Image (tube, coloured by chain):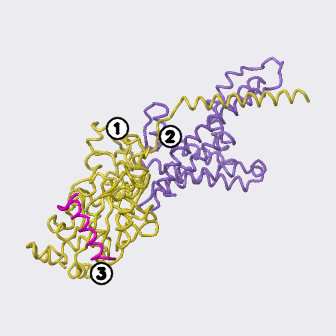
């Protein structure tokens, strides 16, 4: 089976191009310089990864993001390198032939294939809300996950439940990890996640043979170890107390911090501010829009996309405050009057 | 519980609960005292109570500001007390994240200060709070006037200042959201605690100082 290096050669790329990609990958993964020869050796010799990609309650946006990741590998190499044995959106076969291809891949690459899951699961009413070829999503996931070498939940829907899980959650959507509690699941959240991060995690598995180091919520530490706020290029403006008050005011034009416009960067872990999107070209904050924290659990239910993080959720209510004052006033008056009577009675 | 779930809890339902209880408590405390009433006083006022009440409110913060008073006898009380209140109130209202909250509540355009100013306020407030607490624990007279309430309040405010500084100075890493959430959680606890402690002077300072002035005016004595 082809290795990454042989694909580079077939496509007419030079060894220098291959080494550049290997170096970039090692940097992405936060590996020390001493690990570089090991990375090159693995990518030169190890066969390309086999991937089975399942889609459940999703919008295919994660797939779109993945196939546009071009920072580490050129796009023609990427789609050649990652052997997508089953992917409902990208594969040409359909129906019986597609399902048969998946079954064969599971048998052939038992214990070796990477299972990527896009979209949330819906076990409610025996999984009737999401079925493929007559099988429920729960059944499909369990039978495919059984012999997977690595399981990746791609996107916020697969990682946390995402948009389908938002109130009122009519399909009872749950994340992959909740259904596969006995298995290690690598969560790569984001709506969508950064494609280059997905490529790096897959390549990291090829190199080391094991999942990358994960945090307590199953996210790779190399990409989700810090908040966007920590690495934001607008952070100096936050520190200096300079904020844009609207999308088109003078301060916005000067590139001031977007905290006041509702930026959720301080509580959002992702690599947007470092890796960037579209080959590192930009990310939402660089484009002038506040981060709305799409890679954190329940981001949709949090609401208040355009309110600062520090304000009262849903707005401060003077009406409720006055209700509190009235309650306090009545109880205070009663207690005070009773005490007075008791004192006078003595 | 994840850090973001804890964050959502402290800035969502817990903050709302704290604010609701705060308003209940503040009103309860005021009306209980009002309805408890004062013993009837039939004596004719010997001075002008309202003028003295106003005078007390205006000059109280600076009335001890003579060199001898400050530096010969009660330096820690005056300097520490002034720095602490200036720092804590400055931070409460003028740190940008806090200013946005007050702006939403009051509808007034409250200006935020840059980090360098909030740093100065925070370090002076925390340093003076520690000095005041140590002084309180060691001074033979203050020691007798101090109860658990004061130590608890000082600890709570100190923890809020410390976690606030930590959150501002965080240089990156996995625990930032925990630090920020802890800071907000402690602030919620303080909001809950204010009405039921001597910290209620945060709301009633001018009222109680004015009452003292009014009383002095009625009795015809000077401050």
Query: How far, Cα to Cα, is label 3 from label 1?
Result: 47 Å
Select label 3 or label 1 by which is in front.
3
Residue sitting nearer the eye, B201 or A331: A331
What is the chain identity of the residue bearing mark 1? A
Q: Main secondary structure of the magenta part?
A: helix
Residue carrying label 1:
A245
Which color has been applied to chain A in this rendered view? Answer: yellow
Give coordinates of residue B211: x percent, y percent: 71, 28
Q: Cα distance, mark 2 to mark 3? A: 50 Å
How many tags in the picture?
3
- Which disc, if any, is residue A34? 3
* A40 w.r.t. B106: above or below: below
Residue at 71% in and 20% down:
B48
Label 2 marks a residue whose chain is B
- Mark 1, mark 2: which one is toward the viewer? 1
- A22 sits to left or right of A211: left
Q: Quadrant of the N terminus of chain A?
A: bottom left
Task: Where is residue A260? Give x, y as percent.
Answer: 38, 42
Q: Which chain is purple?
A: B
Chain bearing tag 3 is: A
> Left or right: A12 with respect to A37?
left
- Labels 1 and 2 within one chain: no
Q: Which residues are magenta?
A: A89-110
Q: Is residue B96 magenta?
A: no
Look at the picture and state if B82 lies above or below B58: below
* Label at residue B93: 2
Q: Earlier in the sequence, mark 3 or mark 1?
A: 3
The image quarter in which residue A110 lies:
bottom left
Task: Give the residue displayed 34% in from the left and 59% down from the top.
Answer: A135
């Amino acid at each position: 089976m082809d290795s990454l290096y042989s694909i580079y050669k077939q496509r007419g790329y030079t060894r220098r191009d291959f080494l550049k990609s290997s170096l970039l990958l090692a940097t992405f993964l936060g590996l020390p310089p001493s690990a570089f020869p090991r990375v090159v050796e693995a990518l030169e010799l190890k066969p390309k990864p086999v991937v089975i990609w399942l889609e459940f309650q999703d919008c295919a946006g994660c797939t779109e993001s993945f196939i546009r990741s071009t920072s580490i590998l050129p796009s023609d190499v990427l789609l050649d390198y990652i052997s997508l044995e089953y992917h409902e959106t990208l594969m040409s076969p359909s129906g019986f032939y597609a399902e048969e291809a998946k079954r064969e891949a599971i048998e052939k690459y038992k214990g070796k294939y990477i299972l990527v899951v896009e979209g949330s699961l819906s076990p409610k009413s025996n999984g009737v809300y999401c079925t493929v070829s007559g099988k429920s999503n729960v059944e499909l996931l369990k039978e495919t996950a059984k012999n997977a070498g690595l399981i990746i939940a791609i996107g916020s829907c697969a990682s946390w439940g995402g948009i389908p899980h938002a109130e009122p959650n009519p399909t009872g959507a749950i994340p992959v990890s909740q259904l596969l509690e006995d298995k290690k699941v690598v969560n790569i959240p984001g709506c969508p996640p950064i494609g280059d991060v997905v490529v790096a995690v897959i390549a990291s598995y090829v190199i080391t043979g094991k999942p990358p180091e994960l945090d307590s919520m199953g996210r790779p530490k190399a990409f989700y170890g810090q908040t966007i706020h920590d690495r934001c290029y607008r952070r100096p403006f936050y520190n200096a107390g300079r904020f844009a008050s609207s999308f088109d005011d003078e301060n916005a034009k000067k590139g001031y911090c977007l905290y006041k416009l509702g930026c959720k960067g301080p509580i959002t872990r992702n690599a947007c501010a470092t890796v960037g999107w579209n080959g590192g070209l930009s990310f939402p904050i660089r484009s002038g829009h506040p981060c709305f924290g799409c890679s954190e659990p329940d981001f949709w239910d949090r609401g208040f996309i355009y309110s600062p993080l520090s304000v009262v959720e849903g707005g401060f209510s003077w009406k409720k405050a006055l209700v509190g004052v009235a309650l306090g006033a009545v109880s205070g008056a009663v207690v005070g009057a009773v005490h007075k009577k008791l004192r006078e009675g003595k | 519980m994840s850090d973001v779930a804890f964050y959502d809890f402290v800035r969502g339902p817990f903050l709302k609960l704290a604010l609701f209880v705060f308003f209940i408590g503040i009103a309860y405390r005021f009306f209980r005292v009002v309805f408890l009433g004062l013993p009837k006083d039939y004596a004719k006022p010997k001075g002008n109570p309202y003028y003295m009440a106003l005078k007390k409110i205006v000059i109280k913060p600076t009335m001890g500001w003579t060199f001898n008073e400050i530096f010969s006898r009660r330096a820690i009380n005056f300097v520490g007390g002034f720095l602490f209140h200036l720092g804590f109130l400055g931070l409460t209202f003028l740190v940008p994240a806090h200013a946005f909250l007050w702006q939403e509540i009051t509808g007034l355009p409250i200006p935020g200060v840059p980090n360098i100013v909030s740093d100065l306020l925070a370090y002076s407030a925390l340093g003076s709070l520690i000095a005041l607490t140590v002084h309180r624990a060691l001074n033979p007279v203050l020691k007798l006037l101090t109860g658990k309430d004061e130590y608890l309040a000082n600890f709570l405010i100190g923890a809020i200042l410390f976690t606030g500084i930590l959150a501002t100075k965080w240089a990156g890493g996995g625990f930032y959201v925990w630090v920020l959430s802890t800071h907000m959680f402690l602030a919620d606890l303080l909001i809950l605690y204010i009405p039921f402690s001597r910290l209620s002077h945060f709301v009633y300072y001018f009222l109680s100082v004015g009452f003292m002035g009014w009383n002095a005016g009625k009795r015809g004595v000077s401050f």
